[in-house]
Amino acid sequence: MLSMAEASDSGVARLWSDRAAEERSTQLMLIGYALSGLAPAGFGDPEDPLLRATPLPRPLTAEAQTRSLDWLRQAALGLLPRPVSSESQYGLAADQTPQEYILPRSVGEVPYKFEVPPTANRLLANIASFSSARSAVTLLSESLRDADELVRTVAAAVLHSLGRTDDETVQVILRTSRRSGDATVSAIGSVILGTYTGSDEVADDVNADHDDVAYDDNEPPGPGADDDLRSCSVMLHGTFARLTSAQKRWYAPSSPLSKHVRSHASRNLYAGQDYPRWTAGFSDAARAQGTADLLKWCALHGLNAFDTVYAHSHGGNVVLDAIEQGLRVKLLVLLHVPVIERSTSTWSTIEQNVGRVLDLRTGRDLVVAADRLHRKVNGLPLSENRLPQLPWVHQPRRSVAHLFDTSHRRFVQLKTWRKNAIANDVQSAWRLA
């Protein structure tokens, strides 16, 4: 537990409004992890300074789970009148068990002078000093009115996962978020509610060009449906990405990213229009069907192995399940994959069938974090923010900007591949596979 001085020194007392929306969102997700009993290490990079700067509450108490959000706010901020039977000083300790209270009928009848403190800072201080679950839930509730859409969505996602499913504001924010033009916002809402109704008009164009690194994109021909596929590479999309606009299909053979990868990393990237796809449903059953479909696609094309596979989000788990079932892959490139926990024996089987794994992700991927929270609440095998530390897994350190990045799509953007010369990482990993 941090003292108030330590909290101030570590940045906890820093004005909430002074932090960027991505920082506030990350802190709310970390607080949600603590309330739900998940270790903060399951989300974010261990070198992220925001991990230390975020005060964490104890797991959700019965009071914080069942009391109304309005009552919790008043109690957390010391706005409840004193107990009837007590002569103690006005106000409550952060998680003191409540007694009977005399609630005023109007402001004019309140025999106390109320001073509303800077709400978020007061709540953060309570969490730092008392590990207060009450103050943590209140901070989430207050964040439902944040000016930033991402912060509101993360707050609603966490509260929904903590059982506040009947709160009208929480429901409205999550339903609205699925139609957001922000890819991260729509994905978080879709993960928590389990369905996607998002807009195809995403402002963050995953195939946007970038001129920081000069490449010659004269595309060599790739293999198609009638070609010899003994050495074939493919791309596989993630959840909710099957029926989307052409602009968002980074994995389609004709996309700018596919052309770039075919030119600079995998000349044998499949170019036929019958490229592998799956239903992209958000469930273990949908992913199991996706694995069966991928293996069937391989059988129809006379394949039992791939040269390189590029898989995004839960598409990576589809491929990992196929590898467990015998599919061989020389190099597996995982892009923002929330890797589902597997036994040691399962990883041993996968190791026998894969030459090497290149794991690319952003440090504060909020969609992966929401997925883990969703699985925890629903009693499903948890998903990790990164792969286990295995000798055949390569996790290159990207820039500090990526360490602090909350995006779930950064590594399926052409501009990221160009700016960071990702193709060089792929080629290096492929040679070591």
Image: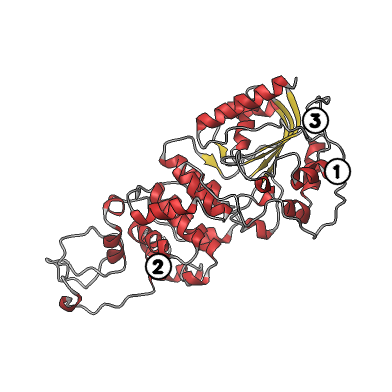
Is residue 315 or residue 79 the one in the foreground? 315
Percent across and percent down for residue 257 are: 75, 46
Dot 3, how many residues are within 10 Å of its Cα: few (below 14), some (14-19), or many (20+)?
Answer: some
Question: What residue does disc 3 label?
Answer: 224
State the image quarter where residue 240 is shown: top right
Q: Say which mark, if any, is on residue 415.
A: none
**Between marks 3 and 2 in the image, the one whose residue lies nearer the viewer:** 3
Residue drawn at 62 percent across, 57 percent down: 203
- Whichever of labels 2 and 1 marks the residue nearer the N terminus, that label is 2
Residue drawn at 39 percent across, 56 percent down: 57
Question: What residue does disc 1 label?
Answer: 219
**Between marks 2 and 1 in the image, the one whose residue lies nearer the viewer:** 1
Tag 2: residue type? Ala
Dot 1, how many residues are within 10 Å of its Cα: few (below 14), some (14-19), or many (20+)?
Answer: some
Q: Say which mark, if any, is on residue 125.
A: 2
Tell me which colouring the rendered structure shows: secondary structure
State the separation of the CA atoms marked 2 and 1: 57 Å
Percent across and percent down for residue 359 are: 68, 43
Percent across and percent down for residue 150 are: 51, 59
Q: Give SS at disc 2.
A: helix
State the separation of the CA atoms marked 3 and 1: 14 Å
Please state if 163 lies on the left or on the right of 23 as rendered: left
Mark 3 and mark 1 in contact? Answer it, CB < 8 Å.
no
Dot 2, how many residues are within 10 Å of its Cα: few (below 14), some (14-19), or many (20+)?
Answer: many
Q: Give SS at disc 3.
A: loop
